[in-house]
Image: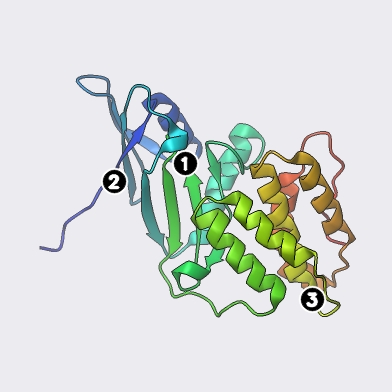
Amino acid sequence: MADEVTVPLLPCSSIDDVEAFYLVLGFRTTYKQRKPNPHVVVERDAIGLHFFELPGFDPAQSYGSCLVVTSDVAGLHRAFAAGMRAAYGRVLVSGIPRMTRPRARKNADGVTGFSVVDPGGNWIRVVNREAGSDAAVGPMRTALANAVVQADSRGRAEQGARILDTALKRPDAADDPVALIEVLVYRAELATVLGDGATADDLLRRVRDVVLTPEQRDSAADALENAADLVQPGSSPSASGG
């Protein structure tokens, strides 16, 4: 048969919290029940997710995960980010819930993707349907690719931060300034994830000091947008990118 559909059934501590979060991302509730077991279904276009409630469940200990395969990773991320900005005033990059940015995954043949970690601690991994990009070139991009594997794919932010710190301690005059921007911004994001606001602010100030040509600024646009999202309320806007 050719009409089979696989639907993930994921745990959470509160179906109400999960439902509210996915409504922010542009989903709609298509089913909800309290008895005999709390259960909610949310859908957005062809994406359908089912959640069941477990009393006492700890989202931080969740192993729940599923893949969403799409031909428009960037568009879906923009839509989710817009919903977060409208509801929370910013894109959530730390804690639970949170969302990473689209990046090529070295451990997935370079396929681009991002992850949403919902209030149930479930990792919704959005991946590109198309083949991955070429391998990273240069020490900065190599470090970035390795850090993404640790922090974005495996959730090991500390390890990703260590990889980037090592690269940033060995600057080279030949470093691509766009790659340097991407490394600095990603390291600032990981500092935010790790609750180190002072380091994040310092890294964003370093982003401001990188001199970019107009063409390089265009290439770094996604990273600079991420930097703007990372600026904390009350901080000076420090991530204009030269």
Left or right: where 27 falls relative to 110: left
* Res. 222 in view: no
Q: Where does label 3 land, which residue?
A: 175
Splitting the image into 4 quarters, where does residue 138 fall? bottom right
* Measured Cα–Cα span from mark 1 to mark 2: 18 Å
Q: Is residue 26 above or below residue 211?
A: above
Identify the residue position indicated by label 1 in the image.
Answer: 26
Nearer the N terminus, badge 3 or badge 2? 2
Spatial CA distance of label 3 from label 2 is 43 Å
Q: Secondary structure at mark 2?
A: loop
Q: Nearer the viewer, mark 3 or mark 1?
A: 3
Labels 1, 2: front one: 2
Figure quadrant of residue 242: bottom right
Q: Which residue is mark 2?
A: 8
Q: Which residue is located at x 83 percent, y 60 percent?
A: 241
Q: Residues within 10 Å of mark 3 (few under 14, many from 20)?
A: few
